[in-house]
């Protein structure tokens, strides 16, 4: 039986460079999604409050500033893509004040503060003009020797400004297609000068930067490097190459630690691994680096739970663990783990919606399971002076979160659920292997509600007449969504089944399956992946011009890799117009050209949901206060449902 997390080596101190850490938990850059620390006052305030709360909870080290160094481009050239910049933040007249405020916020909570120095290489620079991935075809600019020298000085200047602002260290971002990684990689560095060729020459830019930084900041300042252990890219370095880079860095004597990670900006895995991957999946590989080095090793990569963090350290895979999305899910993770309250930690489900809401949808940051994340600067809603009797109808993500939040405010809450289990569509989705963490979250919510004294009545459907006569002061309808069955001729044939029923194990399919995908996020990929797990031969037809257009690049690679490995075929721009025994007819959504698809035993519908809003309509004018939220209003993702619950709970 594993020892309690609080008794783990995780909570033993360690010295990294000039930092005497109180435990082994480090927060890598991620909080900028909550607000730009160099932006408007409201955003900067939100960012600082986010970090301060995690430091006060007990995190030892917060490398919270993902800060871009200055760029050099010709007049008028416009870098593009995530992270593209011309003027680095270190050149901003506000940098010292903003970074100093970050350092003060972190130090006030007893933690150390550092910054990550980033230059996204393809924005637009490279050593040789060679592309670093297979999903982007924008040809980069090849750096000249003078431009390389300029960058060396810019890194040095940026580190100096970090120290002047009161930070405790900097980390060079030599991974995930950063300019520094492109020079390290034999796949992208084909130069024939002193900065390319063999291993030593590919190392030169990184070492030149490190030497320049040390000349600027001296020895009393912590400096580290974040490195891909394996590029997982054809022609790139593999694990032995990563170890060779690590040994060269140690021999150079300029860094205080090595931060080991996996993944890139687009692939399978991406560097922000979704729930398709195991918790801390590559920590054992980090252990090879730890065994090969005398330097302290940090490991980051889907360390989603306190237990996983403890296992990484206790197994000798790393000296320190980095935790990011788990800190979105629960800002008090460290304190709860230290106090032995692991069951009270809100689990991260790894959807990556925290990232994709911002970079794909252009919306405000939000965590799927913790709608309060990023809002630490806002005053918490007080306990009510006028408790209401509230009925929440539906125990899906929206209803569960609303019931808990209302109970925490002091309201008397009843939660009725028509099914015999809580969870709504989260429970259905948990039937897929990669969604196991959804079930963990539902267990957490059930325990949370029990602690708050909220009684969940399962198997009780909220009927309008009974609700209207029950005397509730307010009713919140969170009845979710029914499966959408599109008006396609033949959709009612016996060989056509609903994907939700497949996930629940209630519907069987034949060996050869065609999936009709009419939902823009993860559902069709989840259902198709589940079918491949069952050994089915799968073809998926999308009417959209791209597969799963609302799934961002940091998550799309994992399900597509799984489907490809399982032999599935995916086609786009095909709108299914008829389903008949032995064949399915589709038309190209643009040209209208008709195609016939045959040889399938079953057709599975993955078409999202339609709002179950009948109760809301029937109760209008019959109860004192009526609200609707979640999929009952409009079917969307988990983060939409929990955010709506948060806003409504503040209002009631």
Image (cartoon, grey):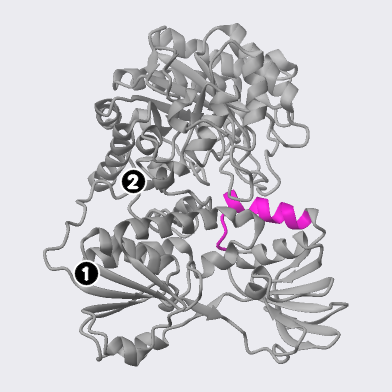
User: Viewer-nearest of labels 2 and 1?
Assistant: 1
Q: Quadrant of residue 87?
A: top left
Query: Depth check: 183 or 597 in front?
Result: 597
Q: In the rendering, at what x and y percent does residue 36 appear? A: 34, 43
439 and 161: which is toward the camera: 439
Residue 560 inside the magenta-drawn segment = yes
Q: Which residue is mark 2?
A: 35
Residue at x 66% of width, y 29% of height: 284
The residue identified by callout 1 is: 652
Left or right of residue 308, residue 460 in this image: left
Query: Which residue is located at x 43 percent, y 46 percent?
Result: 343
281 sits to left or right of 650: right
Q: Is residue 382 left or right of residue 416?
A: left
Q: Nearer the viewer, residue 257 or 359?
A: 257
Q: Does residue 139 appear anywhere in the picture? A: yes
Q: Is residue 4 above or below residue 624?
A: above
Lower sequence index among marks 2 and 1? 2
Q: Position of residue 55 (x, y in %)?
A: 32, 32
Q: Residue at x 46, y 49 (%)?
A: 347
Instruction: Residue 88: tell me if it is visible.
Output: no
298 above or below 382?
Answer: above
Residue 486 location (% of width, % of height): 62, 85
Magenta span of residues:
549-564
Q: Which mark is residue 15?
A: none
């Amino acid at each position: 039986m594993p020892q309690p997390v609080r008794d783990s080596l995780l909570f033993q101190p360690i010295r990294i460079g000039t930092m005497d850490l109180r435990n082994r938990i480090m927060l890598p850059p991620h909080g900028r999604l909550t607000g730009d620390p160099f932006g408007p006052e409201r955003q900067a305030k939100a960012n600082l409050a986010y970090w301060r709360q995690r430091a006060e909870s007990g995190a030892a080290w917060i490398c919270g500033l993902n800060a871009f160094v200055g760029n050099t481009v010709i007049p008028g050239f416009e870098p593009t893509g995530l992270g593209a910049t011309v003027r680095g933040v270190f050149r901003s007249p506000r940098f010292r004040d903003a970074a100093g405020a970050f350092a003060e916020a972190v130090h006030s909570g007893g933690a150390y503060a550092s910054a990550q120095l980033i230059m996204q290489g393809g924005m637009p620079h490279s050593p040789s003009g060679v592309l670093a991935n297979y999903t982007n075809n924008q040809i980069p600019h090849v750096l000249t020797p003078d431009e390389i020298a300029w960058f060396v000085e810019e890194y040095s200047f940026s580190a100096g400004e970090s120290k002047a602002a009161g930070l405790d260290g900097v980390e060079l971002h030599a991974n995930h297609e950063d300019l520094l990684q492109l020079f390290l990689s034999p796949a992208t560095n084909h130069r024939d000068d002193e900065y390319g060729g063999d291993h030593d020459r590919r190392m030169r830019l990184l070492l030149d930067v490190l030497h320049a930084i040390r000349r600027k900041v001296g020895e009393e300042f912590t400096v580290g490097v974040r490195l891909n252990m394996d590029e997982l890219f054809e022609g790139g370095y593999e694990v032995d190459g990563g170890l060779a880079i690590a040994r060269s860095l140690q021999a150079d004597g300029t860094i205080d630690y090595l931060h080991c990670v996996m993944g890139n900006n687009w692939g399978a895995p991406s560097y922000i691994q979704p729930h398709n991957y195991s918790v801390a999946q590559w920590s054992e590989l980090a252990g090879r680096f730890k065994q090969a080095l005398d330097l302290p090793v940090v490991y980051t990569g889907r360390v989603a739970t306190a237990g996983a963090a403890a296992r990484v350290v206790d197994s000798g895979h790393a000296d320190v663990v980095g935790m990011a999305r788990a800190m979105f899910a629960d800002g008090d993770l460290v304190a709860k783990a230290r106090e032995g309250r692991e069951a009270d930690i809100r689990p991260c489900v790894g959807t990556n919606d925290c990232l994709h809401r911002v970079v794909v949808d252009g919306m405000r940051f939000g965590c799927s399971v913790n709608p309060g994340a990023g809002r630490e600067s806002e005053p918490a809603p007080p306990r009510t002076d006028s408790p209401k009797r509230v009925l929440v109808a539906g125990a899906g993500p929206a209803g569960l979160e609303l019931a808990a939040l209302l109970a925490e405010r002091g309201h008397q809450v009843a939660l009725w659920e028509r099914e015999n289990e809580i969870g709504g569509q989260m429970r259905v989705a948990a039937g897929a292997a990669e969604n196991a963490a959804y079930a963990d979250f539902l267990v957490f919510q059930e325990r949370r509600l029990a602690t708050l004294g909220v009684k969940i009545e399962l198997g009780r459907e909220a009927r309008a007449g009974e609700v209207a006569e029950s005397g509730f002061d307010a009713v919140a309808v969170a009845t979710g969504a029914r499966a959408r069955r599109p008006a396609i001729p033949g959709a009612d044939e016996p060989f056509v089944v609903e994907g939700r029923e497949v996930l629940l194990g209630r519907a069987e399919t034949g060996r050869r399956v065609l999936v009709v995908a009419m939902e823009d996020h993860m559902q069709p990929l989840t259902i198709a992946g589940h079918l491949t797990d069952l050994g089915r031969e799968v073809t998926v037809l999308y009417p959209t011009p791209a597969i799963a257009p609302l799934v961002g690049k940091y998550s799309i690679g994992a399900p597509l890799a799984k489907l490809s490995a399982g032999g599935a075929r995916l086609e786009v721009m095909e709108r299914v117009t008829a389903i008949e025994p032995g064949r399915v007819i589709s038309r190209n959504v643009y040209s209208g050209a008709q195609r016939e698809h045959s040889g399938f035993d079953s057709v599975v519908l993955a078409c999202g949901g339609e709002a179950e809003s009948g109760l809301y309509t029937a109760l209008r004018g019959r109860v004192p206060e009526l609200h609707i939220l979640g999929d009952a209003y409009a079917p969307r993702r988990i983060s939409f449902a929990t955010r709506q619950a948060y806003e409504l709970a503040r209002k009631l």
